[in-house]
Image: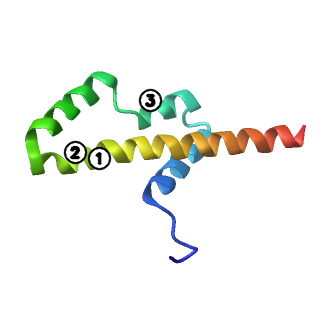
Amino acid sequence: MNSRYEAPEKIEAKAILRLVSLGTTTIDSARDLIAIPEKQEQVLNAFVSVAGKAGIPILRAVSFRHKVAAEFEKLVASVNQEVLNLI
């Protein structure tokens, strides 16, 4: 794999963190932007469980949001560690 390749979820997480660094949003608001509200996720998962193949794109979208959230948390932790190293 090309070392210049970045996974789409990492690209999106970086873009959202950039919004935080510009002061456009807060970290908590960014988390809300990434997350699927619990009730909606339950409905989506219920649909996926009965939809068969038709539910696969929704399953992928939900999975992608979770991956973006995980990447975002890694980036936030990394930035926090860099700040602590400066102190």
Task: Estimate how packed mark 3 is, as few (under 14), some (14 to 19) or many (20 or more) residues with alpha carbons within 10 Å.
Answer: few
Q: How many marks?
A: 3
Q: Position of residue 17 (x, y in %)?
A: 57, 44
Task: Tell me which corner region of the image, top left, top right, bottom left or bottom right, holds residue 65.
Answer: top left
Which amino acid type corresponds to the residue marked 3 in the rendered image?
Answer: Asp
Left or right: residue 41 versus residue 70 is left
Which amino acid type corresponds to the residue marked 1 in the rendered image?
Answer: Ala
Which amino acid type corresponds to the residue marked 2 in the rendered image?
Answer: Ile
Of callouts 3 and 2, the N-terminal one? 3
Residues at marks 1 and 3, CA–CA distance in whole angstroms: 16 Å
Q: Secondary structure at mark 1?
A: helix
Q: Position of residue 51 (x, y in %)?
A: 9, 41
Q: Residue at x 44, y 46 (%)?
A: 67
Residue under label 2: 58
Left or right: residue 22 versus residue 87 is left
Does residue 34 show up?
A: yes
Of callouts 1 and 3, the N-terminal one? 3
Q: Position of residue 36 (x, y in %)?
A: 34, 32
Pick the residue in front: 3 or 83. 3
Q: Position of residue 30 (x, y in %)?
A: 50, 34
Residue under label 3: 32
Left or right: residue 24 versus residue 77 is left
Residues at marks 3 and 2, CA–CA distance in whole angstroms: 19 Å
